[in-house]
Amino acid sequence: MTSKKDNGLTTFVTSNHWGTAVVETNNKKLISINGHPNDNDPSSINDNIIGVVDGKTRIRAPAVRKSYLKNGYKSVGIPRGQDTYIEVSWETALNLIAKEMNRVTKNHGNEAIFGGSYGWSSAGRFHHAQSQLKRFLNCSGGFVSSEGNYSYNAALTLLPYIVGNFRDHVKQATRWSSIAKHGELVVMFGGIPVRNAQVGGGGLSRHRLREELIACKKAGVNFVNLSPLKNDSLEELDSKWLAVKPGSDTAIMMGIAHTLLDEDLHNQAFLDQYTTGFDYFKSYLMGKDDNVIKDALWASKLSGISEEEIKSLSRRMASSSTMICTAVALQRAEYGEQPLWMTVTLAAILGQIGTPGGGYGIGYGGDGSIGTTDRPMHWPSFPQGKNAVEACIPVATITDMLLKPKTMYEYNGKTLQYPEIRLVWWAGGNPFHHHQDLNQLVSAFQKPETIIVNEIHWTATAKHADIVLPATSTLEREDIGAGTQDTSIIPMPKILDPIGEARDEYDIFSELSEKLGFKEQFTEGKNSRQWLEKMWSEMQKTALQFDYTLTDLDTFLSGDVIEFHDPDPEHVFLSEFRTNPIENPLPTPSGKIEIYSKKIASFNYKDCPGHPTWLSPNEWLGGTKSEDYKFHLISGQPETRLHSQLDPGKYSKSKKIQEREPVLINPIDAERMGIKNGDIVKLYNQRGACLAGAVVTDKVRKQVIFLWTGAWYDPEKPETIGSLEKHGNPNVLTHDGRTSRLSQGTAAHSTLVNIEKYTGLVPSVTAFDSPIYKTKK
């Protein structure tokens, strides 16, 4: 689709995680970025790009922290996050890194290097920052890695024990087209937030979820939204909104389950044939274990939803073709495994698993492809090689690892020890967005001897590094775009020249590997273009097996989206298992759905017993801590950006209030607190405090406030740990506790705070300022 016009405009097609874009330039200057014409629901996140890709936040040359440049790894100068930076030559920066890599590996081994690099990175298949870094570190002898993710680590760890891999859940989720034809009722725990479905791992050719949900509604499917936020369901669905107390979903599901059993509305035949361990759970549900009957009345007291409402919903679910949807956000809370396990158990009690329009799904709305499409074949990828270091940590334990080296901890049935990390290298991610309790993280980031960051912009992570390497953006290099579940491959031509001295990660690591003596191993004698040609050749061969003939690479890069057929557009999750559980057993010890897991029970974790269990969170509106902190904070994903990416952009800034991130508050609470729409408010608890802009709305439950994630971390006094955060980053408030010892997942949504109108002098937002002290001449 690349084309030139008489007026000097050039048009390109490219890919982002938030969709396919059509880009116009004039003399290699960005003019416009819009959604692809084939996309009926393009994302406005594109509006963030112009003005940011070459804006003041851009890192334009290699830079070294002033104290580190003077003193090296023994730096005793100004702490990270407070220092300024001096621009240096690429030769100087890479020599510093090579020297430090040799020192650390020689004196401490590769077990002293952490290459976490967690984040969404690039949509391209080759220029994927984490893959590039991990291949480089593997060629150098290995590194301590992390496993799992912040979004759904509880599901990744728990579900293989009870029903199967969570990645299969999202890839094989029952399609909305099937639900439109056969479904009658969709019960959404945590809603299906379409704002999250703007994005898809690796990119999206089209945004389909909105129109698919509306098609279900037009076909007569009814929706129930159990969430503290009404907007977690599309307005067009006219969902029945049950404004639940955050953290109470497991209790509600148990109240529904009790009603189904008490009124003989359950499917005992399904439980007998397809599950194991139900009697253990039934005994617990009926109160035989703890003298607490988990009925609708009990659930009502915990959730704030009436007993009759819970019973009525139970009967509707039993008499309808019912799909239970549970948002991945529910597991990002204390004991986050339990709502997942209870989702599967409740669906099994109804007995509709594996039927068109019925069963359950976890993660709908968390990604634009879940329940809408799946790719017909594997796309090519840049090989990372083999890691010679076995040490690995759960992804959400970075702070503990850095602050508590050599400490023992429990994880997924194992007792492990945190390594002692001397060098941290981050590429393609921003822990100062996704990690919790940022005041602790700031302290943790003082511990390593060296921190290296590859970045495009001066994010908080870059401002806490010793050596900062400027990387190119996706517009400044050529690549192959393809989503992990999308049906298309998307050209990603080079549209702009690199800004400043920015380099492709591959070129950075190629030069560095030469200095360290393993260039041939890293590059295999290929430059970037040759790697792309190799990957494209593999793609051509794979496509032929599916009766697709692809053009040459140059034609593809200058062309348009290539769309393949969806291999199973009417797919029903676990239909094969339901049809014949003997020939199609689940990958569990019993081959069945394990409502009681002997394996998990053998771990003896009180925070994750052997069957679904109600465990009262430490921080929630039903606990004693709510006597001091009156509001439950939910820090959900925003509509204006992908996590923290492009926060300085036009669209992201357009939704801010007096330059701060907006926080939603119920009108009754706002009136009681003397807060008006547009006021600057202060949120605080024992861990920290931040400023935000008030949005007063009746679409949020009383005593619940929503502060979207992704505002760049901006402390008023960086030299003071716990200083007021000026921009609205919720992770100065969230705790760094975990879901349980089973998955060690983040529990950010179990957070209590207070809120008040801010009456002091409002400090300026400086999150987007450069920390450069001295630029190169």
Image: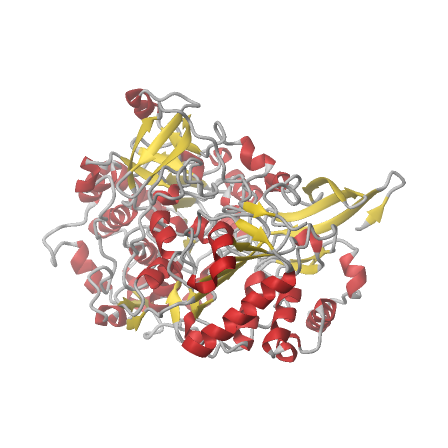
Q: Is residue 422 left or right of residue 455?
A: left
In the rendered image, the vertical position of residue 449 relative to residue 372, given as above or below: below
| Residue that extends furthest to the front in the rendered view of this protein | 70
In the rendered image, the vertical position of residue 281 relative to residue 661, given as above or below: below
| Residue that extends furthest to the left in the rendered view of this protein | 291
Residue 699 location, quadrant: top left
Q: Is residue 295 left or right of residue 709?
A: left
Residue 169 location, quadrant: bottom left
At 29% from the left and 44% from the top, the residue drawn is: 687
The number of discs equals 0
Q: Is residue 366 left or right of residue 384?
A: left
At 37% from the left and 53% from the top, the residue drawn is: 441
Where residue 67 sits: x, y (%)? 47, 55
At 77% from the left and 67% from the top, the residue drawn is: 549
Where residue 195 sits: x, y (%)? 51, 41
In the rendered image, the vertical position of residue 25 relative to residue 430, given as above or below: above
- Is residue 389 in view? no
Which of the two residues, 519 or 555, is positioned nearer the viewer here? 519
Which of the two residues, 421 or 92, is positioned nearer the viewer here? 92
